Image: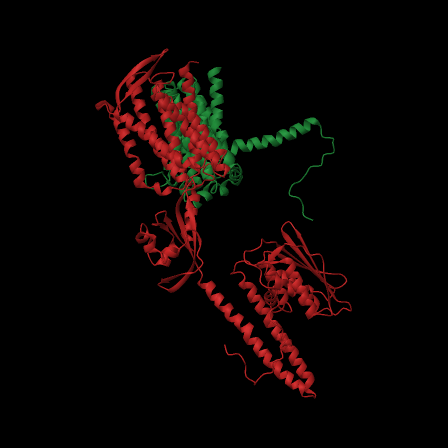
Chain colours: A green, B red
Amino acid sequence: MNESPHQSVETDGTATWGEEVVEQMTVYGERAGDALLYSSAYLAVIAAVELAIVMMLLGIQSNPAPVVVAFVTFSVYAYDRLVDVETDEISNPRQAAFIRRHRDILYLMASVCYGLAVALSVLGGPFALAITLLPGMFGVLYASDWVPNVGVRFARFKDVLVVNTAVVAFAWAVTLTFLPLAFAGESFTPATGIVFCYFFLRSFVDTELPNVGDVESDRASDVSTLPLTLGIRGTRYALYGVDLASLGLVVYAVDAGVLPLSAAVALGLGILYSLSLVSRIGRTEDYEVLSLASECEYLLVGVVLGVLVFI
Amino acid sequence: MSALSQLYVVVLATVGIGLTAALLAWRERPEPGATPLVVMLVGQSWWSIFFAFELQAPTLAAKMFWSDVQWVGVVAIPVAWVLFAMEYTGRDQYVRTKYVAALSVVPALTVVFAATGDYHDLLYTGSELTQQGNVEVLRRNGGPWYWVSAGYTYLLGLIGSVPLLGYVRSETSQFRGQSVALLVGTVAPWASNVLFLYGAVPIPGLDPTPVAFAVSGVAYLGALTRFRLLGTSPAPNRRARRLVFERMQDAAVVVDSHDYVVDMNESATEMLGTSARSALGRPAGDVLPKYDYVPSVGTTSEYVTVDGRNGQRHYDVTVTEVSDFHGRNVGRVISYHNVDEHLRHQQRLEVLNRVLRHNIRNETNVIYGYADLVADEEGPATDRARIIKERAIAIADMGEKARQIVDTFEQLRKETRTVSLRNLVERTVVDANERFPRVEVRVGALPTDVRVNAVLGPALENLVENAAEHNTEPDPYVELDATVSDGWVRLVVTDNGPGIERHERAVLERGTETALEHGSGLGLWLVTWAVGIADGTVEFEENGPSGSVVTVEAPTLPADEETEEPAETAENEQTGTESVGEMDTPPNSGESTTGDD
């Protein structure tokens, strides 16, 4: 006799009401966790936190920029996951399965979010609009083989070593730094430059680190990444270098009086946290968790900064 | 919240909805209409975005700048709308670079005039700020090109709407919903723009068209999601119909009401040995063979012969009228159906008919005659001569049945002839009583004034013969019962004979024979085919404890115009001519008497 693929748990009626609630919460919690993780919604939250950090660092009044960035982040990553669902089958089968199962609703949500982001960015004026459109346009160039109606075929940025990561890091650094500035109508200052460089370097690490786990799928799709070119060990040293450059930048900013010490402490803690994660490259098998932990660096920085500022 | 703030919120909503719809449409590429729809929705969003910037701008120069930038979106919308309508309704032959370029001339000039507005008054003759409450809004006076551009926009709007209007009453609910949503989405901003042009808006000088795009966005989103716009589209319909006409095996020529050739398909050009380019526009009499004999409508009674490159070809010609919406005749479709294969088949049947009707009968007559002579000489050969005579009769009967089958299929070519059901049954009974005097033939009450296809005559005769001939019971009988209900005749033939073997019934039901599975003769095949030709059905069942029940159901028919043939002739037609066994013509010599080999 064939066994049913679904196993049922016998309940003898002794399960308490509280146990049932816990079980239900566990089931729904797992589903919500999957949705948050695989749909890229958690990245939207992290991006909003990053923007809040920028606003605190630059002393900008509250405005809709974090919401715009959250929407854009969700959209761009959701589109990217939809485009790359086949290559992700190798490196991240659970995510690929989730994307396939919810393909239509995910596309609809990404479209709605991008539409809302652009509409909200109009409130910030032309520069805010241009900055909001930037990640979308880079997303097309990064992920697409095809640019509409110009008859020219571009190589995907994704396929060119370092450029691919630099483009993504640049797009995010521009968005994170200049969008709140555009909304607030404030001008460029040395502090803005420091913040821009800081986020460029941090985003570089965040973008390159997941590539360590994607070696097989990137090799299959001819994407050129640091782990493929320098190897695992080489990548670790390269990212150590980027982290140390970030640390140097923060030290310089404090020394030059561009950033307050409290901010530098928060950012420095984040970099130390990142160094500890980079040291795990080549020493762990679970790069999915490592990438997730790396992206959460800003949650740590945000909490520390918030505590230091408000205390 | 002030009126302007509310306006601002609606404009932002318009941007959000428009871009969402554009992204959804983008995903549907390369479905027909997807790309122009994306351009149209992006154009609407563009217009709205820069309209919002115009509202935000603090100075006249800034407001004028954003107002000019809006033109890129403004002029893209009508061009994209027309291209969308053409692609979506299957007229994509108009969506080609040269047409797109031609359509874009006026829009491109408009954008150029907007960008160079400081140097001329073509687009605007003047711009000023007017105070509305505590807000200043831009008011501009249109120049000559402004009205050209507005007129062009409305013209393209109309051109794009026409093919879509055709689907408002489509039989497919999805297409109805799609076209209505699209038209609503298009009419809303244009109606708003018309109000603006007539100065009937609450804030003078402020064009509220981008606000109406909120309605458009919702309508297009609804069409995309609710009615699966781009998921299912009528684009193939027109092509499919054209394809059927182009690729049909019959040659088809369309002539207008003045007898000029206006269209023809590939088979027609092949048949006529010409090209469409040289034939179209010429008088039909110059192009079509024997055009004077072509009826105004209906089918020709004679075949039309065409001398082509591959020799002589024969065609059955059918003419169908083409009427316009008001029922007026605007032309005709003349279709030529090649009947060469049919004619060859008919010739084969005629030869076969002659062989069965004359040659086999004559040969069996000779065999029978000689066997008779041998039987007259008493001795041991008498029994053998009897067997030869029986076999000769069997061969002649088989030939006769085969001839009946050929005759039955010949009926397919002819106009249906009807006979009285009552006469048909009575004749069959009379014949059966003569041929099988040992068998009791019973008949139930017969309906009067009912006519059926005459082809049922041989069918019934063979059923009764099959029931009576092999019946070896002590009290053999055959029962005929006929009833009529709802325009159908139900004829039931019951007997108490040995019945029809199960495997033979199976062969008849399957409709084909193989070397291993086959029937025992031709009679039941004749029944099956004849009933089929009469549009009826036949069922074979067992009759306990012995015998069979055969049920024939066929439609009743109205009386035809021709009078029924005399009983004698009809009887002969039903049963064939007299049987070989009744002929007693001794041969003059051992040679065949037939001379038509």
Q: Quadrant of the N terminus of chain B?
A: top left
Image coords of residue A263 (percent x, y) = 43, 20
| A112 in relation to B525, above or below | above
On the rendered structure, is A3 left or right of B181? Answer: right
| B272 over B357 or under it: above or below | above
Residue B79 sits in quarter: top left
- Viewer-closest of A147 and B242: B242
Relative to A255, does residue A105 appear above or below in the rendering?
Answer: below
- Which residue does the image show at 29% across and 38% down from the upper left? B101
* Residue occupying the far left of the picture: B119
Counting from the top left corner in percent of width and height, residue B18 is at 42, 29
Residue ID at (39%, 35%): B162
Mark yes or no: residue A3 visible.
yes
Count the numbered circles shown.
0
Between residues B62 and B140, which one lies in front from this camera angle?
Answer: B140
Residue B561, percent from left and from top: 54, 56
Q: Is residue B434 left or right of residue A89?
A: right
Q: Is residue A25 left or right of residue B549?
A: left
Pick whichever, A135 or B25, lies toward us: B25
User: Which quarter of the figure has residue B310?
Assistant: bottom left
